[in-house]
Image: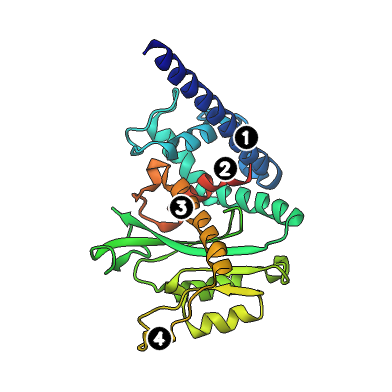
Amino acid sequence: MKKKHKKNKKIKKNKNQKLKAKNKLVVNSIYENIKNEHKSLYDSYQFKTKNQKYTLKIILEACVYFIRISCSFNNFKYKKIKPHAFYKNYVKLNKYKIFESTYNNLLNKYLNKNKIKHIYTDTSTFYNKYNTNKVKRNKYFKNKKVLKLSLMTNELGIPLNIDLYSGNMNDSNICNKQLDELNKKLIDKNNSIFMADAGYDSSIIRNKLNGIFNKILIPQNKRNIRDQNKIKVFTNEEKKLYKLRIKIENTFLKIKKNRRLEIVYEKKSENFKQLIFLSLINFLI
């Protein structure tokens, strides 16, 4: 029993060390982005005023720690930072959309080296507590007020398009908007495959996808077809390819592993969106 206990302790230590190392890389990437692109914000953290007590890196470390735990701003503690001071700095960073800009810069560097072969799309719902913007009731989730997060990822599960929508919005309408925003030059047309669930089965989306992708794997929605004999079935090869779509589900799980992101506590959806971008920076480091 003692040997097992020692092994478990070693495993926990290794996990904590890896997590700390990754958090440092996230903080450094955000810090460099602020330094290069937002000089006015960077200068404001150079102890030019008497009110400043904390460095920029400590506040960024606190932000990374904040999304990992389920805690309100009033009860949040990290080192010697006071809750009110952390909230002020958090709002200050959100005004500049720092986390979104850092993620987009890292994504552009990644896409310059790699072309897109597969694209998976899906939505996930987040229950709402205090949010007033973009929140509506969804009949498929016990008629509760929810926000919808829609993602388009590549074959490795790296999000290419991220946006928040109202809870009652149809998935096919969301996909139609995201396809307009997608950079089609980065897609490898000869080997490209688009995959989605039956909720995206519509003639408008299929017509749009025909010119962009080589293969489209969207199962037919049974509600749209009266005769069940007319439903097209995937071949064995297509079934194997369609199983790879689980990678987008894994991305949603990784986002929701951050306890602060399980439920929406922010009043504005834009602030919640910035926290999602902060969690996604790990994918590109």
Nearest the eye: 11 or 13: 11
Question: Which quarter shows the C terminus?
Answer: top right
Badge 1 amino acid: Leu
Mark closest to the chain's N terminus, 3 or 4: 4
105 relative to 226 in the view: left or right:
right
Which element type, helix, strand or loop, lies under badge 4? helix
Q: CA distance from mark 3 to mark 2?
A: 13 Å
Q: Measuring from the top left, give residue 282's x and y in whole percent.
A: 57, 42
Badge 3 amino acid: Phe
Q: CA distance from mark 4 to mark 1?
A: 54 Å
- Residue 252: mark in rendering: 3
Q: Residue at x 36, y 13 (%)?
A: 1
**Taking 100 as reference, is 16 above or below it?**
above
Which element type, helix, strand or loop, lies under badge 1? helix
Q: Which residue is mark 1?
A: 25
> Can residue 150 be seen here?
yes
Mark closest to the chain's N terminus, 1 or 3: 1
Q: Which residue is mark 4?
A: 229
Which is closer to the viewer, label 3 or label 2? 3
Q: Which residue is mark 2?
A: 282
Badge 4 amino acid: Asn
Q: Measuring from the top left, give residue 51's x and y in whole percent.
A: 50, 30
Which element type, helix, strand or loop, lies under badge 2? helix
Name the outermost residue toward the front. Answer: 236
Q: Tell me, yes or no, whether the two marked residues, 2 and 1, touch with CB atoms within 8 Å.
A: no
The quadrant in which residue 68 appears is top left
Circle 2 packing at 10 Å, graded few (<14), some (14-19), many (20+), is some
Which element type, helix, strand or loop, lies under badge 3? helix
Q: Measuring from the top left, give residue 24's x and y in whole percent.
A: 59, 31
Mark closest to the chain's N terminus, 4 or 2: 4
